[in-house]
Image: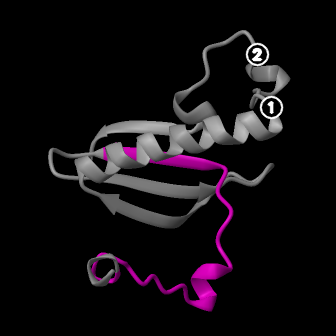
Amino acid sequence: MQQENDNQLNIELSEEIAEGSFSNFVIISHSPDEFVFDFIRVLPGLPKAKVKSRVFMNPQNAKRLLYALNENIQKYEQSFGEITFSANEQGAAPAPMGGFGSQGLA
């Protein structure tokens, strides 16, 4: 029983972070040592968009994120049905992450 408590991670969530930030676009770049995720909010009719959050991960954790996201999408689709793309995206291969961007080396 003590060993279970030793392996527990206590995660704190501040009020500011708990509010969250909406993103409808992400640019993913990488180097040999890290992945960089720039989460962006693009608003219709505006020529500029700001990065709302930047997250750095080592390659191993980026791959863990990939697996966790895949698992959660499968669970979501089992509960709510298949996630589909909008009419203007149908018939075309979706961009990485369904319209989210990606780049090479940072």
Q: How crowded is mark 2: few (under 14 residues within 10 Å), some or many (20 or more)?
A: few
Instruction: Tell me which segment is drawn in magenta.
Output: 5-29
Q: In which quarter of the image is residue 80?
A: top right
Q: Which residue lies at the image location 30% right of the left edge and 58% below the top edge?
A: 57
Q: Against 41, is 52 above or below?
A: below
- Mark 1, Cα crowd under 10 Å, few <14 / some 14-19 / many 20+, is few
Task: Give the structural element (helix, strand or loop) at label 2.
Answer: loop
Residue 66, position as x, y percentages in the image: 43, 41
Query: For this rendering, which residue is in front, 32 or 15?
Result: 15
**Residue type, label 2:** Gln
Q: Is residue 15 located in the magenta-colored stretch of the structure?
A: yes
Q: Do the numbered discs 2 and 1 sit on residues whose CB atoms are within 8 Å?
A: no
56 sits left or right of 96 in the view: left
User: Farthest left residue?
Assistant: 32
The reply, left or right, for residue 19 in relation to residue 51 is: right
The quadrant of the picture occupied by the N terminus is: bottom left
Residue 97 in picture, x, y percent from top left: 55, 35
Q: Is residue 45 above or below residue 1?
A: above
Q: Which of 63 and 32 is in front in this view?
A: 63
Image point 63% across, 90% down: which residue?
Answer: 15
Residue type at mark 1 is Gly
Name the image quarter holding residue 86.
top right
Mark 1 = which residue?
81
Q: Closest to the observer: 81 or 7?
A: 7
Q: Is mark 1 on a helix, strand or loop?
A: loop
Tell me the tag on residue 105.
Answer: none
The residue to which callout 2 is attached is 90
For marks 2 and 1, the one nearer the N-term is: 1
Q: Residue furthest bottom?
A: 15
Which is in the foreground here, disc 2 or disc 1? 1
